[in-house]
Image (spheres, helix red, strand yellow):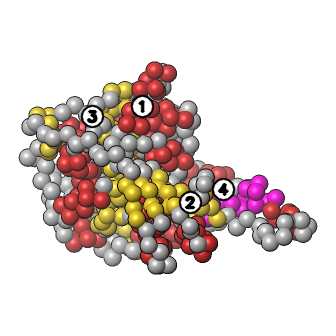
């Protein structure tokens, strides 16, 4: 049998035994989230109830495969799943040979990083392994320096054009500035391109928002997870043509916060990265609560490393978090759906909001500790802002929305301690580096395990300006109501997987 490797897909050719093809399709499959609510499922259930399904057919169980049959025989699958294909063939003792039909990378010499960039001991191995594999996922906890690792990989690979995708405008600026600070060509600083946030500048190394790339390629933007369409850069027709050609010509692609990769948006980008032999994803938590992990590996391949927050705490690179779950047991009446329930018990909950404001004032004003309150809805941030004097609000929507440049100025002021309290939406859930922040108040709740870890990661970076930062204070809220109680349990469960996270309970926070 023959496996033909391309940058995007591979194909298995030959006389494939039925049991082998069945196992390949079963292994490279996932359960479609919410399949119970699809028209296909409902129709199958209706036909089954009336005994009208074709003989031998069962109602759809939500299982979808990432493979497809090749015309003329064979199976096509994403190249990132090559290792699975090999394992199955070896299991059945089926001999095969590999034809690597990917074009050889066009390597350019003279690229390096500045002497200022000094790697930590645990970073060199994954970098070497990643460049050797030419694809994979870097699982590195927040504060572990995964962006710096990618900076080194861009420079050492020397394959251009190269593009670094980020999920919002705040990370766009942060990644752009870091690349320009450390990357060198023939010993001199380089100009790094930027697409998104009102910018359109393509260079050998370019940082781009996922949103702008998606809209350029498809004309659409599919909202992924809880993130809003933060970047609304409007490209004209000629710019879209140029960007689309650039995306398809890039030899190296990296995506920050790669746990979003299973969404249709990023799949569109990766499937259009025809020339990208080098493919890397980065995340502190490269898995999916909806079970679509196989699609992350389809895009990048398997994990290169697994560097946890607890490992970094033990090494002294992060400070331990002291997490307190404050339990609210309230009866505010029923609600017809989740949004109305969330509005009543979270957003407009007067007692809960007063507690949050009191905690913020206690830490930011009374104790002088830089504090960030994280909310899901901009309206919730506006309500809390009215309760906390001199508190900045960072959101991309609502009455108090701020542009990326203005958000950066506020974050810089917290880094220098000119601002002591910030209320922010999910924009600050991921990636943004504010080491001065010592207190996190998680007012928005939510059930995402990836976000639970990402949020804590915002606060456990050590602060070079303040050597007295020995730990981070995390104020969590467990709402004992329909839906929200289950969400709090999910967050607590994932946080307990980190042995160096200290978790306690305040069961008498508020009872009404």
Quadrant in the rendering for residue 72: bottom right
Q: Residue at x 26, y 71 (%)?
A: 311
Q: Which residue is mark 2?
A: 74
Residue 245 image label: 1
Q: Earlier in the sequence, mark 3 or mark 4?
A: 3
* Distance Cα–Cα, label 3 vs label 2: 37 Å
Location of mark 3 (residue): 204
Q: Residue at x 28, y 39 (%)?
A: 160
First to last magenta residue range: 31-43
Residue on which disc 4 sits:
338
| Disc 2 from disc 1: Cα separation | 30 Å
Q: Which of the two discs, 3 and 2, labels the residue nearer the N terminus? A: 2
Mark 2 Cα shell of 10 Å, populated few (<14), some (14-19), many (≥20): some
- The front one of 122 and 435 is 122
User: Chief secondary structure of the magenta span?
Assistant: helix
Measured as percent of width and height from the top left, residue 265 is found at 52, 45
Q: Which is nearer the N-term, disc 2 or disc 4? A: 2
Q: Secondary structure at mark 4?
A: helix
Res 113 → quadrant: top left
Residues at marks 3 and 1, CA–CA distance in whole angstroms: 14 Å
- Residues at discs 3 and 4 in contact (Cβ within 8 Å): no
Separation of marks 1 and 4 at Cα, in angstroms: 43 Å
């Amino acid at each position: 049998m023959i496996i033909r490797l391309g940058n995007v897909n591979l194909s298995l050719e030959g006389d494939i035994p039925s049991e082998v093809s069945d196992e390949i399709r079963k292994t490279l499959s996932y359960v479609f989230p919410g399949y119970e609510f699809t028209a296909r499922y409902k129709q199958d259930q209706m036909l089954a109830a009336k005994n009208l399904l074709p003989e031998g057919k069962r109602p759809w169980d939500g299982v979808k495969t990432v493979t497809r049959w090749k015309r003329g025989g064979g199976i096509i699958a994403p190249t990132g799943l090559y290792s699975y294909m090999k394992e199955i063939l070896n299991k059945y003792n089926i001999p095969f040979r590999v034809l690597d039909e990917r074009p050889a990378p066009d390597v350019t010499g003279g690229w390096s990083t500045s002497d200022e960039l000094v790697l930590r001991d645990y970073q060199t191995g994954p970098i070497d392994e990643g460049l050797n594999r030419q694809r994979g996922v870097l699982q590195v906890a927040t504060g572990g320096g995964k962006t710096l690792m990618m900076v080194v990989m861009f420079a050492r690979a020397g394959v251009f054009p190269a593009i670094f995708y980020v999920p919002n405008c705040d990370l766009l600026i942060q990644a752009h500035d870091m690349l320009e600070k450390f990357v060198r060509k023939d010993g001199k600083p380089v100009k790094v391109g930027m697409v998104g946030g009102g910018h359109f500048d393509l260079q050998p190394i370019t940082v781009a928002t996922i949103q702008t790339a998606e809209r350029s390629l498809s004309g659409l933007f599919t909202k992924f997870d809880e993130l809003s369409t933060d970047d609304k850069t409007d490209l004209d027709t000629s710019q879209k043509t140029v960007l689309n050609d650039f995306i398809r010509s890039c030899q190296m692609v990296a995506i920050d916060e790669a746990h979003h990769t299973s969404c249709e948006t990023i799949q569109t980008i990766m499937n259009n990265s025809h020339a990208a032999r080098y493919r890397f994803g980065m995340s502190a938590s490269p898995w999916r609560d909806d079970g679509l992990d196989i699609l992350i590996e389809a895009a990048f391949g398997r994990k290169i490393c697994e560097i946890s927050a607890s490992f970094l705490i033990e090494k002294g690179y992060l400070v331990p978090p002291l997490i307190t779950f404050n339990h609210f047991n309230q009866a505010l009446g029923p609600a017809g759906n989740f949004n109305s329930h969330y509005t009543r018990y979270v957003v407009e909950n007067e007692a809960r909001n007063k507690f949050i404001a009191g905690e913020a004032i206690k830490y930011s004003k009374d104790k002088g500790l830089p504090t960030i309150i994280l909310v899901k809805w901009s309206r919730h941030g506006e309500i809390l802002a009215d309760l906390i004097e001199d508190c900045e609000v960072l959101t991309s929507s609502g009455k108090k929305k701020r542009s990326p440049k203005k958000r950066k100025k506020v974050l810089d002021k917290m880094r220098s301690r000119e601002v002591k309290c910030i209320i922010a939406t999910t924009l600050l859930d991921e990636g943004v580096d504010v080491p001065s922040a010592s207190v996190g108040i998680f007012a928005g709740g939510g059930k995402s395990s990836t976000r639970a870890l990402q949020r804590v990661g915002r606060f456990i970076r050590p602060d070079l300006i303040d050597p007295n930062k020995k730990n981070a204070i995390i104020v969590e809220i467990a709402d004992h109501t329909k839906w929200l109680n289950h969400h709090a349990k999910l967050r607590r469960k994932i946080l307990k997987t980190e042995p160096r996270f200290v978790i306690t309970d305040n069961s008498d926070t508020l009872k009404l």
